[in-house]
Image (cartoon, rainbow, N blue to C red):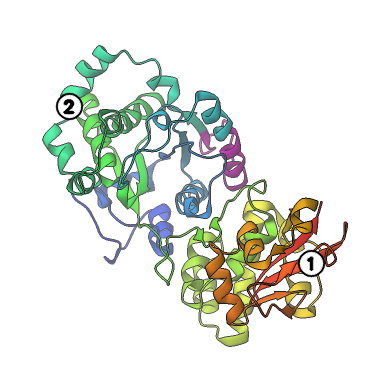
Amino acid sequence: MTSTSENTDHNFRSKALTELFGRGFGNQCTNLTGLDEKLNSEVVPVYIGFDATADSLHVGHLVPIMCLRHLQRSGHKPIVLMGGGTTRIGDPSFRSDARPMLSDEQIDENIRGIRKVFERFLKFGDGPTDAVMLNNADWLNDLRYIDMLREIGVHFSVNRMLSFDSVKSRLERQDNMSFLEFNYMILQGYDFLELFRRAKCGLQMGGSDQWGNIINGIELVRRIERSEVFGLTMPLLTTASGAKMGKTAAGAVWVNEERLSPYEYWQFWRNTDDADVGKFLRLFTDLPLDEIAKLEQAKDAALNEVKKLLANEATTMAHGQEAAEAAAETARQAFEEGGSAEGLPEIHLSRDEVEADLAVVDLLVRAGMTKSRNEGARLIANGGIRINDEPVVSRDDVVAAVDLREGQTKKLSIGKKKHILVKMM
C-alpha cells in the first residue's frame, strides 16, 4: 500500500485526476497509476461518507462535495453515503472527546437537511453517472454482532488499529476512547465492502485524516472479495491565516439558508484573504483553470472585483443565481452607497431587551459578531464599531428604547465589511 503526495508532478490520462489534481484536491492515493487507468477506461462509482451530525453542511464540507461534482462532470458516478448508522457512534478521528449521542429521529432530520445541499451540487437520478444517496444504517443497523465478528473482525489487527494517528494521538493525550468509538473504523471499512458488493464502488475519497480508515476498507475488500479498490484523500484545508476552513468568529459558515442567509454566505466569500483567492477559485468554482490563472494575477481594485466574482460563483452554486444577484446588490448598496441596505442579515430584539437598555457590547455577542463582551470593547476602543455609520465611542453605550422604536432598524457594523440590521419585535 503506497501513498502519493499532491506535490508530485503527474501526467494523467484520465480527465478526472487531471481535474482533481489541477485544482488542488489530490493528496494521498493508494495506487495512483492504477486509479488513473481505471478512471480513464470505465465509469467508476466513487463514494464519500458524511455523518449526519447537523441538519446542514458548512463550507468546510465543500471540498469533498466539489470533488464529487468534478468526478461526475468527468463521467463518473458519485455515491453520497450518509452515516445514519455510524452517526450513532461518532467518528473519533483526532477528537479529544466523544461526539454527543443523537436520537434516530434527529439523525433522520439531519439527513433530510443535508440532502438539500447535495441536490444543488450534483445531479441525482437513475442514469449511469447520476448521483445516488445511500444510508449505511440500511446495512449496519441490522448486523448480527457474532456474525460481524466472524466475517469482518478477523481481518482487523488491533495492533495496527492502535498505530493509526487518529487513535494514537488520542491515547497519547490520555483522552478516553470508548470501545464504541474504537469500532468506528471497522464499520467504515465494512461500508466500503458493502458498497463494492451493492454498487461496484471502486474508489473511496475523504479528508487526509481519514487515510487509515480508507486503507482498512481497501484491505477488507481485497481480503474478502479478492478485488482491488482505491483510496484517494484530499488535503485538510486551512485559510492563509491558518484558520480551519469554514470557521469564523461567529461560528460555522453553513450552506443551508435556514442556517445562514445567502447574503452572509456571499459576504463570506467576498471577504476572502487576498492570498486565498486563486486557491478558492480552483476549489470552489467551475471556472476553467486557464481563466483562473489569469484572474489570480489581479491586484488592488481589480482583485476586489475577482473576489466578487468568487462570491457570485460560489453563492450561485449553493443558492441559485437570483439569490447571488440579490446578495451582490445588497452588498453594493451597503458598501458603495452607504445606505441601510434592506436585505442585510437581521437580528430581532424583544421589547424587554430594548427597554432594558441593551449594551452595545452585549448586542455584538447577541448578534454573533463577536465572541465576548471584551472583544466588542476592544473593537469599540479602536473605533471599529458603528451604528448607522456613526462610531460607538464607549463600551457603556446602549441601544435604548428611544433609539429603536417598533418597526425601525439600526445598522450595526464592524469595520467596512460586517453589517447586520437590528430590529425590535
* Residue 116 inside the magenta-drawn segment: yes
Mark 2 residue crowding within 10 angstroms, few (<14) / some (14–19) / many (20+): some
Q: Find residue 155 and name its label.
A: 2
Amino acid residing under circle 2 = His
Helix or strand or loop: what does disc 2 sit on? Answer: helix
Asked whether residue 310 is in view, the answer is no
Measured from the top left, where is residue 350 in percent x and y?
77, 51
Residue 326 falls left or right of residue 112: right
Q: On the picture, is 55 further left or further right than 387?
A: left
Q: Position of residue 392 (x, y in %)?
A: 69, 77
Q: Relative to residue 165, is residue 107 depicted above or below?
A: above
Residue that protrudes farthest toward the left in the picture: 159
User: Toward the viewer: 421 or 356?
Assistant: 356
**Sequence-first tag of 2 and 1:** 2
Residue 91 point in image, percent of width and height:
35, 38
Q: Quadrant of residue 192?
A: top left
| Label 1 Cα crowd, 10 Å radius (few <14 / some 14-19 / many 20+) | some
* Residue 41 magenta-highlighted: no
| Magenta span of residues | 112-132
For label 1, the residue is: 410
Q: Residue at x 56, y 55 (%)?
A: 253
Q: Is residue 266 left or right of residue 69?
A: right
Q: Give the CA distance from mark 2 to mark 1.
A: 63 Å
Quadrant of the image containing the N terminus: top left
**How many numbered dots are placed on residues in this image?**
2
Q: Residue 107 placed where, x, y %?
A: 51, 30
Q: Residue furthest bottom?
A: 300
Residue 299: quadrant of the picture: bottom right
